[in-house]
Amino acid sequence: MKQKKIDRLLTFYLPVITLLVFTLFPLYWTVNTAFKSEGDIIKRPLHYIPASPTIENFVAAWTNVGFATYFKNSLIVGISTVVVVLLISTISGYALSRYRFKGKRGFLLMLLCTQFIPRSMLIIPLFIIFKHMGLISNPLSLIITYAAVEIPFTTVLMTGFISNVPKELEEAAMIDGCNRLQTIRHVVFPLLIPGVVATSVFTFIYTWNEFLLALMLTNQQDRFTLPVGLSYMMGEFNINYGALAAGSVIALIPAVILFSIAQKYLVNGMGGAVKG
């Protein structure tokens, strides 16, 4: 019995605790720094709990640094991208799931292969295209780019989700008088809610955290998204660590809330995609 406890400690509890500490400590230290005054941040020895907690860093980040504008820009780009990606990937996934046509497997393989293209290779051609279109520092350029990057992968996901919806349900609805669009709207889509939530969350988190493309396609400070805005809080000669940490915490909040609300849908949705 003692040996079993030791084995369980070494093979389960110790690795899990190590992983949790390794993963959560940077988050804890960011939150810890966000609530410290500038003097406490640079004070030695380090304090693992703020001696005099303050919210000044959050106020400074939100008002003085322009973080409210960055937050709004990220929300506009993220929500718009999710709507575009969801619409196109659902229609494309339905076609790939329900119809047979020559080259279908090759097309699916091509969609997957697009995920191997480094994003950095797209920067120069995208910059030239959007410059000629007059869309540099325009949120539309980011929405188009993010949608183009995400649609191939989300289409493959939605194909798996839709394949799990029995065709017999659609056939029964058509016998009752529904056309194809009505069948998709009233029969297929309600059963796709876990998949839709999973696809939406992954797309939103990607757009919320993406930095490189946003940096290259935006050169006006009032159009920065959160990751770009955070990077500009690090000056050449001075870094306001407290405001930077507070900004990072603010940027984390929507993602944490989104995952906590959509957790059960994510599990069911990804299970459906794998099964499909």
Image (tube, grey):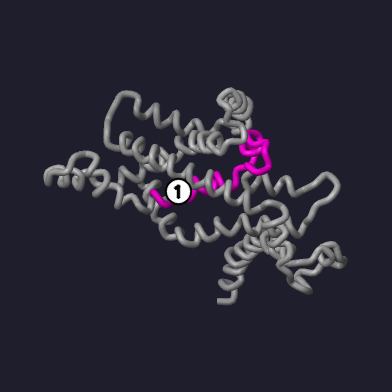
Say whether residue 217 is magenta: yes
Judge whether 68 appears above or below 120 on screen.
below
Pinpoint residue 17: horizontal percent, then vertical percent: 63, 65
Q: Residue at x 65, y 46 (%)?
A: 227
Q: Amino acid at mark 1?
A: Ser
Q: Which residues are magenta?
A: 196-223
Say whether residue 25 is magenta: no
Pinpoint residue 202: horizontal percent, then vertical percent: 49, 48
Pinpoint residue 199: horizontal percent, then vertical percent: 44, 47
Q: Residue at x 33, y 34 (%)?
A: 96
Asked which quadrant contains residue 83, the reply is: top left
Magenta highlight: main SS: helix
Q: Which residue is mark 1?
A: 200
Q: Residue at x 24, y 49 (%)?
A: 186
Q: Residue at x 57, y 68 (%)?
A: 8
Judge whether 116 appears above or below 37 on screen.
above
Q: With 255 as the anchor, is 105 left or right in this view?
A: left
Q: Secondary structure at mark 1?
A: helix
Asked which quadrant contains residue 58, the reply is: bottom right
